[in-house]
Amino acid sequence: MRPATLDEMVGQRRLLAPGSALRRAVESGHVHSMILWGPPGCGKTTLALLLAKYSEAEFRAISAVLSGLPEVRLVLAEAEGRFNEGRRTVLFVDEVHRFNKAQQDAFLPHIERGSILFVGATTENPSFELNSALLSRCRVHVLEAASVEDIVEALKRALADPERGLGEQNLRISEENLRLIAQAADGDVRRGLALLEIAAELAVDEDNEITATTLTQVLADRTRRFDKQGEQFYDQISALHKSVRNSNPDAALYWFARMLDGGCDPIYLARRLTRMAVEDVGLADPRAQQMAIEAWDAYDRLGSPEGDLALAQLVIYLASCAKSNAAYAAFNAAKSDVREFGTQDVPMHFRNAPTKLMKELGYGSGYQYDHDSPDGIALDQTGFPDAMGERTYYQPIERGLEIKLKEKLDKLRSARIAARAQKKS
């Protein structure tokens, strides 16, 4: 059922819409070297085949998983021979991101000379996985996962086509069950067709009808797309973190469930959730950090699936409670000053003086013991090195517990300023 024309391709309406730049280039045969970036089953290989067909070029395919540099050189030599004879070659490199830098560099002179039309396919972000020299010579086209409607359309074509599909079997299936297959395909047209084929084999015993009972068997162990090391992984943890920060417990819980469903290590999630508790909740609700540690400990004791609920409760709490990054911002500001001012001496009044010599040198001189002060705080005593002067890093916000902290610190900072001014006068 692989599409034989651009019109037969499902999905990719943005990229291959009538009149689009890529479609005009393909239909005219004036194509360029390119990187096709998209999830599995979205049409990368099909598009490469169509490029060769419309360009009347030889199609050669290699896989970065299975091919080494000797095979690459052989294919390139063959393409060079065709080029000298006035014939073109579309070289399709599947999983191109798995080639190392040296292997990727082998294509560069051939792309520049025009002896090959290079088409690399990848499921990973080319910015991270491909070297800049190759990227500069290729245009990157982003392909999207097929929608449920797109996959339903492909399944209907397969059911109706007697030559390339299952048309001769006269299969019957309801629209609802067809959508179940499309949903289980999870954006992968190839996967949807494979599921339909399996269901068709089982339907022989059901009077050629693909029933809900049949699909129960076929779809029992389906899994969603998830790459534990790829960009999709980091996109999802980013979505979880930002949903918590956005105080949206429902969205946060969805992304948490998505990552668990995809096989993410719950301990990794526990660590990231603890980071959210200290970075985004902070002192607006100090209980969040304690709850994060307790949820992590509960998962360690219970494991999955029982311990998953402890982490889920933590997700809901973090997303629902008051937020403040004031402590996070204050720490970053303090680190910045450490880098800027270098190694500053501790003020003499803050230094210990355990020996006679140190006392004679002025260590501890002028130190005011706070508990002896009227309000328990020596207001005119600085805590910073002389070269820096007083600094203010922590700026509490008016949310959660920080409302009280802000009231206290605002009064205390004003009193310190007044006390120091009086001392100078």
Image (cartoon, rainbow, N blue to C red):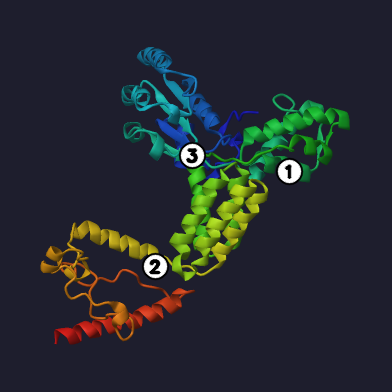
Left-right relation of 365 to 323: left
The quadrant of the picture occupied by the N terminus is top right
Q: Which residue is mark 3?
A: 230
Query: Which numbered disc, 3 or 1, marks the residue that appears first in the sequence?
Result: 1
SS of the residue under disc 2 = helix
SS of the residue under disc 3 = loop
**The one of 35 and 348 positioned closer to us in this rendering:** 348
Quadrant in the rendering for residue 361: bottom left
Q: Which residue is mark 2?
A: 326
SS of the residue under disc 1 = helix
List x then y, in percent, for residue 94: 49, 27
The number of discs equals 3
With respect to residue 55, does 352 lie above or below? Answer: below
The quadrant of the picture occupied by the C terminus is bottom left
With respect to residue 26, does 327 lie above or below? Answer: below
Residue kind at label 2, given as amino acid type: Ala
Q: Which mark is residue 180?
A: 1
**The one of 305 and 32 positioned closer to us in this rendering:** 305
**The one of 131 and 254 positioned closer to us in this rendering:** 254
List x then y, in percent, for residue 358: 14, 64
Residue kind at label 3, given as amino acid type: Gly
> How far is mark 3 from mark 1, CA to CA?
27 Å
Left-right relation of 199 to 32: right
Say which residue appears at 55% left-offset and 30% top-offset: 46
Q: Nearer the viewer, mark 1 or mark 2?
A: 2
> How far is mark 2 from mark 3, CA to CA?
32 Å
Mark 3 Cα-neighbour bin, 10 Å: few <14, some 14–19, many ≥20: few
Q: Nearer the viewer, mark 3 or mark 1?
A: 3
> How far is mark 1 from mark 2, CA to CA?
47 Å
Say which residue appears at 82% left-offset and 41% top-offset: 212
Asked if residue 29 shows in the view, the reply is no
